[in-house]
Amino acid sequence: MGLRVLAAMSGGVDSAVAAARIAEAGHDVTGVHLALSANPQSHRTGARGCCTIEDSRDARRAADVIGIPFYIWDMAERFQRDVVEDFVAEYAAGRTPNPCLRCNEKIKFAAVLDRALALGFDAVATGHHARLADGVLSRSVDQGKDQSYVLGVLTRAQLSHAIFPLGDSTKAQVREEAARRGLTVADKPDSHDICFIADGDTRGFLAKRLGEAEGPIVDQSGAVVGNHHGAHGFTIGQRKGLHIDRPAADGRPRYVLSIEPVSNTVTVGPRAALEVTSITCGAPVWNGPAAEGDLTVQLRAHGEVYGCRFEEVAGGLRIDLDRPATGVAAGQAAVLYSGSTVIGSATIVSASRG
């Protein structure tokens, strides 16, 4: 007997093919598009965004082709509170958030899953590129499109009601299948960047909400080497757009090493000063089997992986890396893997040379 499945349909090719596969497998599928913007009047420009009127229409057309019921759920208020406002608050505190990860955690697999279960659905299906078998989350076969990192925050309970039909397919295979099925989104560009910042100008977006406040850019000795209009406009590891008044003594580029929101100070230095080997994280979420074999950690979406060791400490987790990492920012997630299997995640609090 098939399951009652709610298929989250963003209007893109991945979620459309995921819904089609679930329906073809004999499940009772209902499509739902999440209206996440309070003002979705503007259409997509390029490949940015995933919450426009165009996207909702594309999702509806895909549902019609598949032959499943389709609804639009207004999640704009919840999205604004749990994702957008969280994003702004994290930057104001000197951290670097990942809004896609927060959206998966708070919207797609909290608000939507909770409502789906209350309505009698058995599971929620999405077009994420990740594998899920017997409640265990693993990397997609398409390493370039793998999204297990942004799903690493999900709990065992949430994963038990999730379906990711695309994990065994490459993106090219998904597009080819969409064309065979007559789905008009087969060649639609992927969404990227931050969906609620349509023009891609994160610094401008934050300035409008947090204002501008001039502050110093200093080197490691504390000497002022420039000025800025808001520490929230910087991220750890940033190289471009620093507007430093004079070059470093060695002539090499300088990078953002730390951000202090209280004093509104940005510290810069050489790339070597970014290297860290020890990471402290908040309370972990364990969502996979017990750690065994070679362990690795991924510190940002589509970032490098590092061999590691970890131990639980009071209130959190300490991760020691086998080799130095650069650009590790507080607020990002550290997702732990055993081979290709996700075993848990935690939010980065701080990093050091060990």
Image (cartoon, helix red, strand yellow):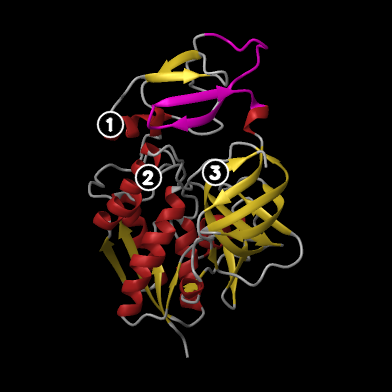
Instruction: Count the numbered circles shown.
Output: 3
Q: Which percent across, then down, holds residue 11?
A: 39, 56
In this view, 47 is above or below 175: above
- Does residue 256 belong to the magenta stretch? yes
Q: Secondary structure at mark 2?
A: helix
Q: Relative to 75, is 220 on the left or the right?
A: right
- Amino acid type assigned to the residue bearing label 1 in the image: Lys
Q: Badge 2 is on which residue?
A: 87
**For residue 350, which numbered disc appears in the image?**
3
> What kind of element bears circle 3?
strand
Residue 221 falls in image quadrant = top right
Q: Nearest the camera: 128 or 214?
A: 214
Q: Is any part of residue 175 visible from this angle?
A: no
Q: Which residue is mark 1?
A: 208
Nearest the viewer among 325 and 158 is: 325
Image coordinates of residue 153 in percent, x first then y, are 50, 61
- The magenta stretch is 246-271
> Residue sitting at 61 percent across and 12 percent down?
248
User: In the rendered image, is residue 17 in sight?
Assistant: yes
- Which mark's residue is nearer the viewer, 1 or 3? 3
Which amino acid type is marked by label 3? Ser
Residue 96 percent across, percent down from the top left? 46, 41
User: Which residue type does callout 2 highlight?
Assistant: Phe
